[in-house]
Amino acid sequence: MSKIARALAKGMLSPEMEMLSHLIRTDEKVPFHLKAQWNVLPYSYYAYNLFYACRLARKLKIRHVSAIEFGVAGGNGLLALEQHAEIIEQLTKVKIDIYGFDTGSGLTEPQDYRDLPYVFKAGNYQMDAPRLQERLQRAQLVLGDIGKTAKDFFKTYRPAPIAFAAFDMDFYSSTVNAFRLFEERQPDEHFLPRVYMYFDDVVGGETFAYNDFTGELLAIHEFNAANRNVKIAENRAFRAYPVNIKWYHQSYIMHRFRHQLYGKYISKSSATSLALR
């Protein structure tokens, strides 16, 4: 890939932005979360979302959380999530458990047009489970049909509250099954009041033709329509950032409005903020 193509992919074409990105990548004094924000880490979107999820947990005095990757494939993302978790635990003093959901044998047959069969084919993205398991340090693989593994997850694993979830199962149908873990009927004790989320298949090139009527975007819309007090919304923090990077538009936050900690004050603003000078 050419330098111009790489810059375009990052959303930073100007020489000034390229130089700034290089400085952020190489300067050890730049904080971890800023390196993630500027997309200079492997799987920066995992690093960013997990960091801010754990920062929220710390503000709420929750010291043990879970992170989930739905759709592990070969396992590169899960390994990166482990590496980021090691650093984030040190920075936030919040313990992180990691779970990876996958069939273990690649994609199944698409069910209908909503699963985007023109870009996702049965058998794609297979896993070498024994080899991956040897390399994993902390993550637990949850292998099998997501419709069954999601149904029994809380009972079987008794996870710490979910703080971050990444969705990369490609299909609408698989995403809908994963969303059953997050429905309003699930006890709020299983979640932070705001859960950071990343969706891999909502932004892409012309071949993918992502739209609101298929795939993950349709699953999100249907989830929001079906759950009155739990909503998945775009993370708008990036609208104030000086650069435009693809994964900014793939980052969401699930809001559980009736969670007992949803309204707990976590801002630093005080009574004297914005006082007359």
Image (cartoon, helix red, strand yellow):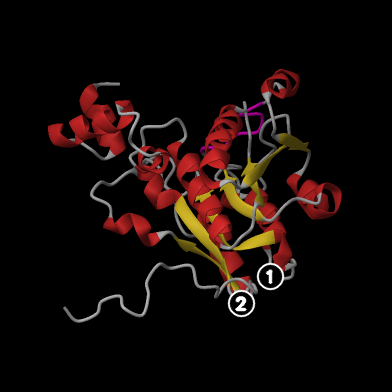
Determine the image quadrant of residue 6.
top left
Q: Which residue is mark 2?
A: 228
Residue 30 left/right relative to 150 = left
Q: Residue at x 61, y 60 (%)?
A: 61
Q: Quadrant of the C terminus?
A: bottom left
Determine the image quadrant of residue 136.
top right
On the image, the x and y values in percent for residue 2 come to 25, 21
Q: Which of these two is toward me, 245 or 16?
A: 16
Q: Which residues are magenta?
A: 119-126
Above or below 15: residue 237 = below
Tell me which secondary structure the magenta stretch mostly adopts.
Answer: loop
Count numbered badges in the picture.
2
Q: Residue at x 29, y 33 (%)?
A: 24
Label 2 element class:
loop
On the image, the x and y values in percent for residue 16 come to 14, 35
On the image, the x and y values in percent for residue 25 come to 32, 29
Q: Which residue is mark 1?
A: 184
Q: Residue at x 50, y 41 (%)?
A: 46
Q: Residue at x 44, y 50 (%)?
A: 250
How far is disc 1 from disc 2 in space, using C-alphas?
8 Å
Q: Quadrant of the N terminus?
A: top left
Q: Specify whether residue 199 is in view.
A: no
- Tag 1 and tag 2, C-beta contact below 8 Å: yes
